[in-house]
Image (cartoon, helix red, strand yellow):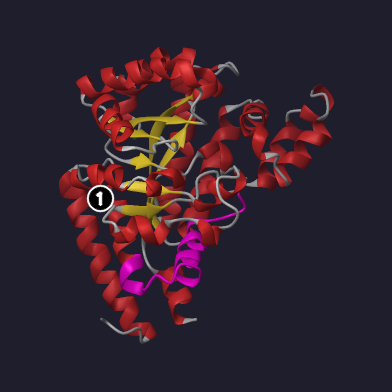
Amino acid sequence: MSLVRYIELMPKVETFLQLEGAFARNSLLHIAEQNDIPFTLKHYKQWTALVDKPDYNRLDDLIQTTAQWIQTPDDLARLVYELGVALAKQNIRYAEVGVSPALYVEQGFTFEQFLNAINDGRSRAERAWKVGMRWVLNIRRTQVRTSEDVLRWVSSAAAKRGGVVGLGVAGREIGPEEDIVERTFRTAQKKGIGRAPQIETLSSAEEAAQVIDVFGPDRLLVGTKLAQAPEAMRLLADAQIPVSVCMPRAVHLNQIASISAFPLRKMYDDGLAVSLSSGLANLYHTSLNAEYKAAAEIHDFSAREIESMVLNGVRGTLLPDDEKATMTADFKRQFAQIRAELGIADD
């Protein structure tokens, strides 16, 4: 019980949370009603049912549809603020949140309106709850033709002023059109833009070498297949590339049968700088605290090992090195203080 409580109290970072899967359900439905979506969207009740109980083979459709319910900057700012509150309640001190700007530009937002809206919610959450949030602008694999737009946005002066720290890619890998994503990341690498791709099909040393070359990742979200390729894990470990995993995603996409089957222990023991993420938290019905509790209760991770994964998450942020060092030192101090308060052995 003390380890569970420790996880709740300890400071944490979240590096692969996706905004479009983390909206508070009740607020999202309230916004939909305010915007008359029940009267203008065919099969609205079926879509709301999917918010509660997603068909995980239709996640992209669900994300695309629910994004259309957000029609004003105030809608988006409110949802971001509430996300900040939810993060603070888990003692997540800093989060790099993936967000897909093309979804909102398709709704009629300009990029500047979109950026101002998410930063309105962010600044209110930071002032009230002392939680830091920054943005990773995602290319959605279902919208790869917007890649150049996303790269232009993430490179803009407005983005630099507006808390954007890097470029990401979200969704399942889709074959031939991956070439567009790869070209975009090559350009981002040349421009020195932070890069945090999601490459869950990575399953061999050859693929790992290609990912390192093409994407030049500052961190990766990886899937279960990586654990079946020791040489690939060694390449990532030698390259000192932090990796994050989302265990419920692997379950919901039928990669594994249960959380207990996730190869977390193997990844950790084989030297990967692995941390945990909640991904599409509300659609996966999870939280970052729940993920670290699962590591302790299902995968038998100790307090020290959980601390190590949290610090791997700090390493994987796109912050400047001096800010990472400051956060690491602060977290270590707080770890020791909370362990002492709870009587957890300092082994």
Magenta region, main secondary structure: helix
Question: Where is residue 176 drawn, in percent x and y?
Answer: 46, 16
Q: Who's the residue at 41% across and 14% down the image?
A: 149
Is residue 253 visible in the rendered image? The answer is: yes
Front-most of 165 and 344? 344
User: In the rendered view, would you say 181 is above or below 226?
Assistant: above
Is 63 inside the magenta-drawn segment?
A: no
**Which residue is tagged 1?**
315
User: In the rendered view, would you say 160 is above or below 238?
Assistant: above
Answer few, some or many: residues within 10 Å of disc 1's Cα (few below 14, many 20 plus, some between 14 and 19).
many
Q: Is residue 275 left or right of residue 256?
A: left
Question: Where is residue 133 drawn, in percent x and y?
Answer: 39, 44
Is 299 inside the magenta-drawn segment?
A: yes
Q: Quadrant of the C terminus?
A: bottom left
Q: Is residue 27 left or right of residue 339?
A: right
Question: Where is residue 40 drawn, in percent x and y?
Answer: 81, 22
Q: Who's the residue at 31% across and 83% down the image?
A: 340
Question: Where is residue 313 drawn, in percent x and y?
Answer: 32, 52
Q: Is residue 196 left or right of residue 113?
A: left
In what element is the residue under mark 1? helix
Q: Who's the residue at 36% across and 63% down the image?
A: 11
User: In the rendered view, would you say 118 is above or below 113?
Assistant: below
Q: Who's the residue at 24% across and 67% down the image?
A: 332
User: Which contiguous range is marked in magenta?
Assistant: 284-306
